[in-house]
Image (cartoon, rainbow, N blue to C red):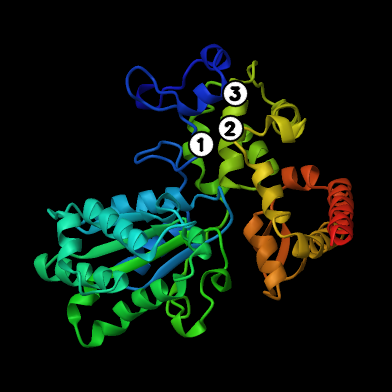
Amino acid sequence: MGKNRVISVAFLKSLSHTQLYTMSLATGQSCHYSVGGSLEKGAVSYVVRQADQDLYQTVRDGNFGYVLDARQVGKSSLRVRTMQRLQSEGIACAVIDISSIGSHGITTTEWYLGIVRRLSRGFGLRLNVLEWWAEQKDLAPAEKLAKFFEDALSTESSTEFVVFIDEIDSITHLEFKDDFFALIRSFYERRSQCTAFQRLTFVCLGVAIPSDLVGDRNKSLFDLGTAVQLKMLQLKNAAPLAVGLQDKAERPEILLEKIFSWTNGQPFLTQRLCLQTLITPGFVRVGDESSFIEQVVYSKIIKDWEIQDRPEHLVTIQDRILRNRQQSAQILHLYRKILEQGQVPDTQTLLQQELLISGLVRKHQGYLQSTCRTYSIVFNAEWIGRKTTDLFHLNQKVSHAR
């Protein structure tokens, strides 16, 4: 089987969930499927989507791009692949993970210094950041970041720079977030006067809607940028996933088709169900694919899902839906309507955007629909009723406490 060799089912079965998600073969080859976190460079189970080309082309055109979507739909994996492609062309790329810098109790100076440190390291610049920072004592923190880019562009006069700002939703707690976006916007506006800034491009990725990120519309970047849409994995492009099932079934492509019938190509859920299928005992004969996958879905994903949802996925969706007590009841009502009617027109209201960003529903031909069959069973009418009742009692309790 060569480099696409599949680990023995017996060995996989003997490992814990944590071991399964982190293990590697003695040869250094990773497990075929990856559940949790971004897929590494060269991951054999990566499925190419239109977003791969769209984000790459957005950056190559020098435009600001942003990927704002639900958790665990492949944003970070898309970033890793795009960076790999750009770096192979000699383009310098750096990643700023906003969540790693912090957003609670951090000063403006500490935050911007953290940005400069990550950029310098990511771009591989030979710069003593603390000394350089001290030398700019007459500048405000945001001005120092601007000066950093000016210096980098002038020193590396032929290099193109791309900055990926990941976990951008973590910025919502910062009082000075609008000024940060205004600064990035200014870099694009300066291109007409200073052509060096044409070699600097930004990409934002995270779980948010634009109105969450920028309060002042005059400072917003998003009206200048290109939104890259992450659609579900397509079965016709999913051959890399079928490779991992080649020793599991007589017709691995049929087995994969049945997996997609439950996940609709949701990336995390698809990888997870592929892995669970692989480690579940038994060889799948022709005609048994549907019943085998159904048994795996119910026993490994749906049954007691709030307990066995590791790494968290379904719980993450539930937490997103219920995170805003004042808004959650309306979101649940909207979701109930989608389940009952099958779909509702996409009118792009804030409520619909909040439901979309949870990942529970997706856009399809101008309508909002449940993302997949598995979600519809887990997050069903009974679940909606329980959570609606819980919210009512919680609101009553808070009201009486006042």
Kindly identify the residue that appears in the image at 65 percent across and 56 percent down: 358
User: What is the C-alpha distance between the residues marked 2 and 3?
Assistant: 12 Å
Question: Could you tell me which secondary element the residue under label 2 belongs to?
Answer: helix
Is label 1 or label 2 in front?
A: 2
Q: Label 3 near label 2: C-beta < 8 Å?
A: no
Kindly identify the residue that appears in the image at 41 percent across and 36 percent down: 44
Asked whether 397 or 373 is in front, the reply is 397
Kindly identify the residue that appears in the image at 52 percent across and 69 percent down: 213
Residue 304 in the figure: left or right of residue 107:
right
User: Residue 398, how many percent across, how many down?
Assistant: 83, 58
Q: Name the residue under label 3.
A: 249
Where 35 sits versus 341, above or below?
above
Residue 261 in the figure: left or right of residue 156:
right
Which label number is shown at residue 363?
Answer: none
Q: How crowded is mark 1: few (under 14 residues within 10 Å), some or many (20 or more)?
A: many
The residue type indicated by label 3 comes to: Ala
User: Residue 253, how many percent across, how many down?
Assistant: 57, 34
Residue 215 in the figure: left or right of residue 38:
right
- Number of marks drawn: 3
Asked whether 166 or 287 is in front, the reply is 166
User: What is the C-alpha distance between the residues marked 1 and 3?
Assistant: 13 Å
User: What is the C-alpha distance between the residues marked 1 and 2?
Assistant: 8 Å
Is label 1 or label 3 in front?
A: 1
Which image quadrant for residue 290?
A: top right
Which label number is shown at residue 274?
Answer: 2
Q: Label 2 near label 1: C-beta < 8 Å?
A: yes
Q: Mark 1 points at which residue?
A: 241
Is label 2 or label 3 in front?
A: 2
